[in-house]
Image (cartoon, rainbow, N blue to C red):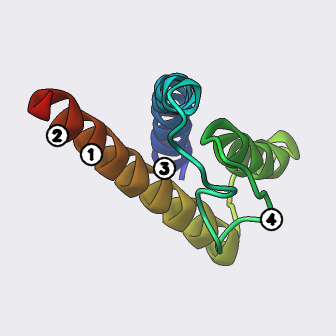
């Protein structure tokens, strides 16, 4: 279980860094009058934001609450939820980076 916890910890750190990068791009788009959306994810999170970082922070907080209690065996439902949220975040970040890359190559 310790390997799983460490892998999740590393993935959360990566998701956090990518969220910071995505959010910078979102801010640039907004200054150009683009990026007019109110939430990145419509389900899977309690958070509603037009930035990635709050979603990563929600997931990270839940994860740290679980391991902060000294649990070495995270309940499977909680583990599945965290992994699913990571998958959603990484997938959406990748699509976002791809869309931005495609647009910058066109100009």
Q: CA distance from mark 1 to mark 3?
A: 31 Å
Q: Secondary structure at mark 3?
A: helix
Circles 1, 3 touching at the beta carbon (< 8 Å): no
Q: CA distance from mark 4 to mark 3?
A: 24 Å
Circles 1, 2 touching at the beta carbon (< 8 Å): yes
Circles 4, 2 touching at the beta carbon (< 8 Å): no
Q: Alpha-carbon neighbours of circle 3 within 10 Å: few (<14), some, or many (≥20)?
A: few
- Residue in the image at 60% along x and 60% along y: 82
Going from N to C along the chain, the mark reached first, 4 or 2, is 4
Q: Nearer the viewer, mark 2 or mark 3?
A: 2
Q: Secondary structure at mark 1?
A: helix
- Relative to 101, 4 lies left or right: right
Q: Secondary structure at mark 2?
A: helix
Q: Badge 3 is on which residue?
A: 4
Going from N to C along the chain, the mark reached first, 2 or 3, is 3
Q: CA distance from mark 4 to mark 1?
A: 26 Å
Q: CA distance from mark 4 to mark 2?
A: 31 Å
Q: CA distance from mark 1 to mark 2?
A: 5 Å
Circles 2, 3 touching at the beta carbon (< 8 Å): no
Q: Badge 4 is on which residue?
A: 46
Outermost residue to the front: 33
- Residue in the image at 62% along x and 69% along y: 81
- Residue in the image at 66% along x and 47% along y: 50
Q: Nearer the viewer, mark 4 or mark 1?
A: 1
Of the 4 image quadrants, the one containing the C terminus is top left
Q: Badge 1 is on which residue?
A: 99
């Amino acid at each position: 279980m310790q390997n799983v916890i460490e892998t999740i910890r590393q993935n959360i750190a990566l998701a956090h860094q990518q969220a910071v990068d995505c959010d910078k791009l979102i801010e640039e788009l907004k200054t150009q009058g683009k990026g007019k959306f109110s939430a990145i994810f419509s389900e899977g999170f309690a958070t509603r934001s037009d930035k990635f970082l709050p979603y990563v922070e929600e997931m990270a907080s839940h994860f740290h609450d679980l391991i902060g209690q000294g649990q070495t065996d995270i309940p499977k439902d909680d583990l599945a939820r965290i992994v699913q949220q990571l998958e959603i975040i990484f997938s959406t970040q990748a699509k976002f980076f791809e869309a931005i890359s495609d647009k910058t190559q066109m100009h």
